[in-house]
Image (tube, rainbow, N blue to C red):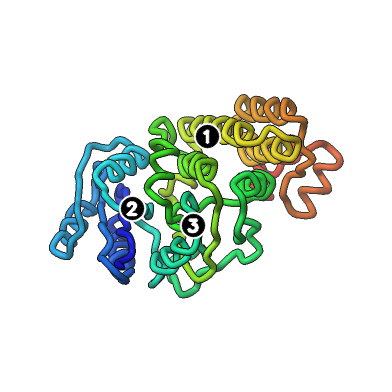
Amino acid sequence: MNPPRVSILVPCYNAAPYLRATLESALAQGGGDAPEIIVVDDGSRDDSLAIARGFEARGVRVIAQPNCGAAAARNAAFAASSGQFIQFLDADDLLAPGKIAAQLARAAREPAGTALTARWGRFHDDPARAAFPDDNPLFVDLAPRDYLRRYGSHDCMMHPAAWLLPRAIVASAGPWDERLSLNDDGEFFARAVAAATRVAYCADAVSLYRSGLPASLSAQRSRRHLESAHLALQLIVDEMTLLDDGPAMRRAAADLAQRFAYDYYPAAPDLVADAENLARSLGGSALRPLGGSGFQAVRRLVGWKLARRLQVLAGKFPG
């Protein structure tokens, strides 16, 4: 019996320097039927569309659309797909050989409705030098409520390429929220986890996250992106507490809100105030801001907000 077919969905915007390597990693997955690979070019202004079309002879399907954002590109790719399992893959990330095969093998031993994750690492230029956060508290099998508790309580990222999702989970979670740019992935995968019966971690499946790109969404701090991160926070907290409104989940949600406050002050004081109010409404957070010994010493004297402002000023005007 052949394994189920997998659709690899690649949203692409101005990813010309990286797209070839990404698509080669998708084509190299092998095992059973060849995956269905769909690239949705989201109005790229570089050579991305031409590069993607160069792979059509190897079975890659290419869809071009005006620039609508990554969430819209993923939704278009999913609508065009037919696979029983869905692999989201950003156009600058990579799948290690055998990643999907390892997750399919695990899926065959799991109950229906299981979401599958992988071991993932960050790299800049050389994927062979990727750093793997093996202390990641999400690198273990978990029930959905426990996964979301750990996500909220720790500084974790839900790397899109790490997941392999049954099509039914993606359909149940609903479309990617096209209002969002920053943290649209965190918001979507929070819904996917909530729609799953369990989350199975596959240590022998590996994906690679290209980090440190100045044009990446995660590096953006425009007002629009900050508002997106704030809306994503609210939606994730709603998803967490809808799944489980007990004290442990509320503490985890409060930690998530407080971490937003630490991350985005002083760039957006109004959004930070909203996040702090949200944390208090959930029962409060004991989370402390990250920072070196100097920052922590100043924080204890003058409070974290003034300490953060002084830290930002020192960064801009080193003395």
Checking the image for residue 84, the label placed there is 2
Query: Do tag 3 and tag 1 residues touch (Cβ < 8 Å)?
Result: no
Q: Secondary structure at mark 1?
A: helix
Q: Which residue is mark 3?
A: 116
Q: Residues within 10 Å of mark 2 (few under 14, many from 20)?
A: some
Say which amino acid is labelled 2.
Gln
The residue identified by callout 1 is 232
The disc, 1 or 2, on the residue closer to the chain's N-terminal end is 2
Query: Badge 1, how many Cα within 10 Å: few under 14, some, many 20+?
Result: many
Q: Nearer the viewer, residue 285 or 109?
A: 109
Please state the horizontal and vertical placement of residue 21, each as a whole percent of the image: 31, 66
Q: CA distance from mark 3 to mark 1?
A: 23 Å
Disc 3 from disc 2: Cα separation: 13 Å
156 lies above or below 4: above
Q: Secondary structure at mark 3?
A: strand
Reply above or below: 97 against 319. below
Residue in the picture at 52% in, 65% down = 202
Look at the picture and state if 183 lies above or below 16: above
Name the front one of labels 3 and 1: 3
Q: Front-most of 163 and 130? A: 163
Mark earlier in primary sequence (3, 2)? 2
The residue that appears at 47% across and 49% down in the rendered structure is 113
Residue extending farthest front? 1
- The residue that appears at 24% across and 50% down in the rendered structure is 46
Q: Do the numbered discs 1 and 2 sit on residues whose CB atoms are within 8 Å?
A: no
- Looking at the picture, tell me which residue is in the foreground, 98 or 108: 108
Horizontal arrangement in the rendering, residue 85 relative to residue 271 (left or right): left
